[in-house]
Amino acid sequence: MVYRGPYKIAVEEKDRPAVEHPNDAIVRVERAAICGSDLHLYHGMMPDTRVGTTFGHEFIGVVDEVGPSVEHLQPGDRVMVPFNVFCGTCYFCAKGLYSNCHNVNPNATAVGGIYGYSHTAGGYDGGQAEYVRVPFADVGPTLIPEWMSDDDALMCTDALPTGYFGAQLGDIGLGDVVVVFGAGPVGLFAARSAWLMGAGRVIVVDQVEERLAMAEQFAFAETVHFKQVKDVVVHLKKITDHLGADVVIDAVGAEADGNRWQHFTSTKLKLQGGSPIALNWAIDAVRKGGTVSVVGAYGPVFSAVKFGDAVNKGLTLRMNQCPVKRQWPRLFEHIRNGHLTPSDIITHRIPLEHVAEGYHLFSSKLDGCIKPVLVPNA
Ligand SMILES: [Zn+2]
Ligand SMILES: [Zn+2]
C-alpha cells in the first residue's frame, strides 16, 4: 500500500526493497495488521507523513534475503518483527528501552524507529506490503515458535505487548480497581492482562457497543458506555466507593481513534481540537496517590492536561511506547498456557489489494471492525 494523502490509500507496485546495510534482512510478508495508530497517519494527523510511503508496523513473514553480516537468520525462517526498529546496543537499548533507541531515527530525539510510521519515526517503510526491509535483523526479529499460530504471532508485534505493558506500567497491586479508557485492541489486551497482575476489578470505558461487548467477553471486564452516563468521571467515582480507581490506563492514545475522540472533544465538549480528553478523565477518575498509565501514540503537541490536579492528587504518571521484544518471553508463556488468546480479537481478514477498503472500514468503525488483518496474495 502507498499513502497518497489524508484518507487516500492506493495499491501500487514498488520495487522490492533491497539490502541496504550488511545487517538488513528482507522479509516476505505473510500477514500485516492495521493498527488504530495507523489511523493517525491515514487521517493526516501525524507530522511528516510523506506521500509515497508504506505503512504497517505489525507484520510477520518469511525471511527472503539476508545481508552478509546477519548471523541468526537465514532465508526461509518464519519471523515475527517487533514494531520498534532498534539497534540493541546503544545506551537506551542496553537498559531495555528499545522504543527509545538512540541510533535509528535521525529525525527526532524523543521517539525511536517505528516501521511505516512517518519520517517522524525514522522514515522506515512498513509491512503492509509484499516485502519489507528489516534493519538490525539479528536484533528485532525472532523465529515464530513452532507451537504459536501466525495470528497470535501477529498480535505479538504490537497490540498485545502494548496492552500488557500498559497494565505493567500501572503497577497493579493485589485486588486493585483498574479502569481502562478505550476498548480497542490495546485496551482489550490491557484489561485482560490486568487480571494476570492481580486486579480485583477491571472496568473498561468506551462508546462503541461491539467493543464494549468484546471487553465483557474477551477481557471479563465491567463496562461503561460513556455516552450513556451523565458524567463518566462521577459515574466511575460512584462505583468505586467515591475514592476513584487505584490504576487508570489510557489506551485511547494507543488505540488512536483520534477522529472519534477528538471529534467528541471538539464538538461535544467544546474543548480545543486535540485535547487529551481521555487523559484528563484518567487524572480525574484515579484515586489520590494512584497511578495513571499511558501507552501508545500521542502525536501532536497536547495542551490543557490537568497537570495541577495530577500534582495535587500525588499521582504517579507512567508512559512510553512499548519495548515490544522485552515483553515477549512472558507473553509467550501466557499464550502457550492459554492465559492469553490474542488472535480472538481479529475481526476481519482483507486481501492486501483491498487495503483502501480496509482502512475505510476500520476508520469508520463499520461492520464491527476491531482488528483487521491484511493478507498479501490472498
Ligand atoms: Zn500498532
Ligand atoms: Zn539502540
Image (cartoon, grey):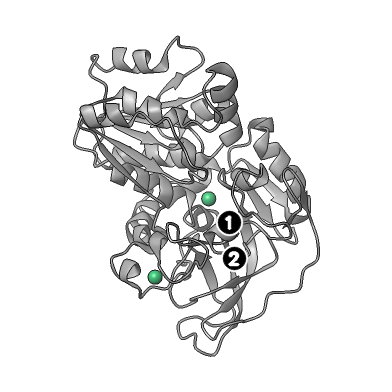
The CA distance from mark 2 to mark 1 is: 7 Å
Any atom of ligand 1 within 8 Å of the CB at mark 1? no
Which one is earlier in the sequence, the residue at label 2 or at label 1?
A: 1
Give the residue at x 22% y 18%: 243
Would you say the residues marked 2 and 1 are in contact, meaning their CB atoms lie under 8 Å apart? yes
Q: Is residue 339 left or right of residue 117?
A: left
Quarter of the image where the C terminus is located: bottom right
Q: Is residue 42 left or right of residue 143?
A: right
Using the rendered image of the protein, determine whether residue 339 is visible from the camera's viewpoint.
no
- The crowding category of the residue bearing disc 1, from other C-alpha atoms within 10 Å (few below 14, some 14 to 19, many at least 20), is many
Give the residue at x 41% y 52%: 321
Residue 125, how many percent across, how many down? Answer: 63, 64
Q: Give residue 117's mark.
A: 1
Residue 229, how many percent across, how many down? Answer: 45, 11
User: Most extreme residue toward the bottom, as rendered?
Assistant: 68
Q: Amino acid at mark 2?
A: Tyr
